[in-house]
Amino acid sequence: MKHKLALIGCGGMARAHASRLEPLFGRLEVGATVDIDLPRAEAVSRLLPNHPPAFTDYRDAFPFCDCVLQVLPHHLHSKCTIDCLDAGKHVLAEKPLANTEKECLDMIAAAKRNHRILMVAYCMRFHPLLVEMKRLLDEKTYGRCFQLSIWTEQYTRGCSMGVPVSDEEFWAGKKALVGGGQLFSHGCHYIDLMLWMLGNPVSGSHMGSHYCTEWMEREGTSNVTVQFESGAMGYHFGTWGAKGTRLGYSFHAHCEEGMLEADIRAGRLYLHSKMSNHNPGANETENLKILLEAPSAKPTTAEMAHFLDCVDTGRIPFTNPEDSLNGLRVIWRLYEAEEQNRLADLHGLGISTARL
Ligand SMILES: NC(=O)c1ccc[n+]([C@@H]2O[C@H](COP(=O)([O-])OP(=O)(O)OC[C@H]3O[C@@H](n4cnc5c(N)ncnc54)[C@H](O)[C@@H]3O)[C@@H](O)[C@H]2O)c1
């Protein structure tokens, strides 16, 4: 059976999704596009070969779909997703799951009572370079991992995924709509990845600031440090104020026998090794090995394929809402501890279905 997908919210990220659906047209077609701003819904419809009907109210799309891709501002995630699940639709919901613990739990309960798939669109979990990095860490191919560092350097002012916006229209700058700041909105990907790669966290700290990113009510630049049960450390630096970058999106995993580097922009997973003694000026390119090459594009096609697999088989999504909520709990505890000027206790986040 070919699935019919409604695309709800037709801004920047929805366009990115729509532009990468073609390889899946044997399995799905877009049955409807929806945006409160009708010209946006119509513009995304025109990107698609069948020009599906466009609506301003997502409930009008229900007769035209069995699945939904929900790509709305964060404060709207919970209500829309629950309405879709209650209408019997499977939902792939953009990250973060929602802005509060209660909203997230209500979404999980709605999926359960309707026996429908709810998957969170953490696309970086489907990136081939990171999937391979995770495999190498799990198998301890280069020994135990003791430090995972993640950099994401972006500039967001005046633009949402390629769509121009003023500071006033930029909902992601507003604490109440986005649910926090840069860490909650974008860093949630990387907290989720850290938990996936390093396991259960023990304690951590966050320091953020909106200095030089004043279009963000809360932090536009974020520094997170987390310690894990194994003893490994995780670090994430993310900014929305970068006017230049060398690292782009970069992941460094230091293991006992070498350092794995996923350079997302270059599309390469490297192994750096054989640095035998302390030598800060070392040129160790001769010891650099390319382990994998993969396209740098966001892997939303693989993500959507996995969603369809889960819908077809009833399997629990790899990026399930319970695990996603655990990542958000880390962020909420980090924010709370930051306000109280103390370390965050990250023990006992909840049950992880994927790790059971
Ligand atoms: N996975 C990723 O890498 C990634 C990247 C960027 C954004 N996102 C996520 O995608 C989601 C949307 O972000 P965006 O950057 O596309 O935002 P955006 O502002 O560009 O798009 C949101 C769209 O929703 C529409 N909208 C608002 N209220 C609506 C309603 N009640 N009914 C229907 N449409 C409504 C707006 O008109 C707008 O077109 C967010 O959850 C964001 O975090 C994910």
Image: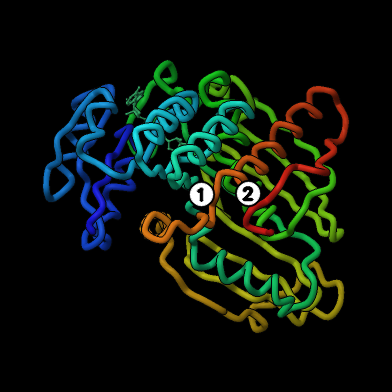
Q: Is residue 329 above or below residue 210?
A: below
Whether residue 353 is visible to the viewer of this picture, yes or no, is: yes
Whether residue 160 is visible to the viewer of this picture, yes or no, is: no
Q: Is residue 261 above or below residue 44?
A: below
Q: Is residue 95 above or below residue 217?
A: below
Q: Is residue 148 above or below residue 292?
A: above
Asked if disc 1 and disc 2 are in contact, CB closer than 8 Å, the reply is: yes
Quadrant in which ligand 1 is drawn: top left
The residue at 22%/32% (across/down) is 41
Mark 1 or mark 2, earlier in chain: 1
Q: Which mark is residue 104?
A: none
Image quadrant containing the N terminus? bottom left
Which residue position is annotated with label 1? 122
Residue reaching furthest left? Answer: 50
Which residue position is annotated with label 2? 192
The residue at 68%/47% (across/down) is 236
Q: Nearer the viewer, residue 33 or 261?
A: 33
Q: CA distance from mark 1 to mark 2?
A: 8 Å
Judge from the rendering whether residue 322 lies leftward or rightward of residue 258; answer left or right: left
CB at disc 1 and ligand 1 closer than 8 Å: yes
Image quadrant containing the C terminus? bottom right
CB at disc 2 and ligand 1 closer than 8 Å: no
